Amino acid sequence: MNSLTFNAMQFHPIQRNDNQIWITSAELARALGYAREDSVSRIYDRKSDEFTSDMTLTVKLTVKGFGNGNSEKETRIFSLRGCHLITFFARTPVAKEFRKWVLDVLEKEVLQQQIDTRVKINSEQQAELKEIVDRRAQGERRLHAEIWARHNRHFRITRYSDLLAIHFQDAVNYLETLEVKSKGSIYIDEKQSLEMLCVHARFFQAWWNTHSPALAKLNPLLVTMLNDNMFSMSSAISGVSKKCGFTMPNYDYDHMFELQTLPHERYRLLK
């Protein structure tokens, strides 16, 4: 990402080999409305114990000098998470607005990195999927193989370890709701389809509750209209669940879509 813009101010992110966006303390100070370029560095000096190495560090940047000479200057830079933490200590009128902007950029960046690099599920996630299949197959080898075959066809992969991290939640839901007959064959009936629909509707509600305040700044009327739809969706989920006799997964829905919760961690938030 070569540039970012906030309130007509254009940032020039520092390029490093860690797939993160880094912003200089001087640019961050200007974005937060400080007159002095060292204001953010001074905030950091007071609160340095609350920052980790992936939030801020110092690098040597080449700056243009007088005439034809250039020189290196040690500069403090902040990742997006570091920028987000700085906003809690800043006291400028624009700090709150900038904080929400950083969260939006951070979420887009995390998702884009996963898409660009096609991050696959880690060993812990693989083990979780394997546990579900082993439990549901109950030792029947043919059923065990059939469940994996259905899973891999559904996600268009050759083996379950190739599953992308952004699809981990869907895989958990798919394997847990795949209905197995007593004789070991698998089928998907109307009840299962309704259950999957309700689960995904509940996930969308969780995302909406977390991010609708930011969307309301772009289109307050649309958010008001969709809030009414969310209320109706809650009633529908409750009614369908009761009629079909299934129980919704008891996730910590209030926190699973917060931006500090990485996608591969969201689905461990079972209460």
Image (cartoon, helix red, strand yellow):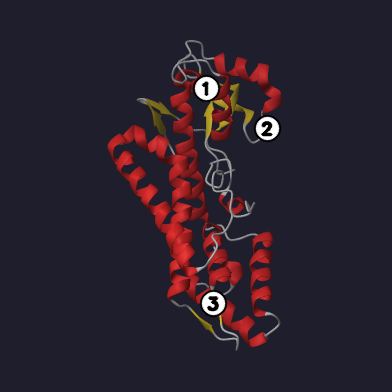
Cβ–Cβ below 8 Å for labels 1 and 2? no
Instruction: Please tell me whether mark 2 sits on a helix, a strand or a loop.
Output: loop
- Residue that badge 3 annotates: 179
Instruction: Please tell me whether mark 3 sits on a helix, a strand or a loop.
Output: strand
Which picture quadrant has residue 235?
bottom left
Question: Which marked residue is nearer to the observer: mark 3 or mark 2?
Answer: 3
Amino acid type at image mark 3: Glu
Which picture quadrant has residue 4?
top left
- Residue that badge 2 annotates: 52
Give the quarter of the figure containing the N terminus: top left
- Residue 129's spot in the image, x, y percent? 63, 67
Looking at the rendered structure, which numbered label has been put on residue 63?
1
Q: Earlier in the sequence, mark 1 or mark 2?
A: 2
Q: Residue at x 52, y 22 (%)?
A: 63
Which picture quadrant has residue 219?
top left
Q: Nearer the viewer, residue 248 or 128?
A: 248
Vertical order, 201 against 161 (above or below):
above
- Disc 3 from disc 2: Cα separation: 46 Å
Q: Is residue 87 left or right of residue 141?
A: left
Instruction: Please tell me whether mark 1 sits on a helix, a strand or a loop.
Output: strand
Question: Which marked residue is nearer to the observer: mark 1 or mark 3?
Answer: 3
In this orientation, does residue 126 appear? yes
- Residue 26's spot in the image, x, y percent? 52, 20
- Residue 209's spot in the image, x, y percent? 45, 42
- Residue 27's spot in the image, x, y percent? 48, 22
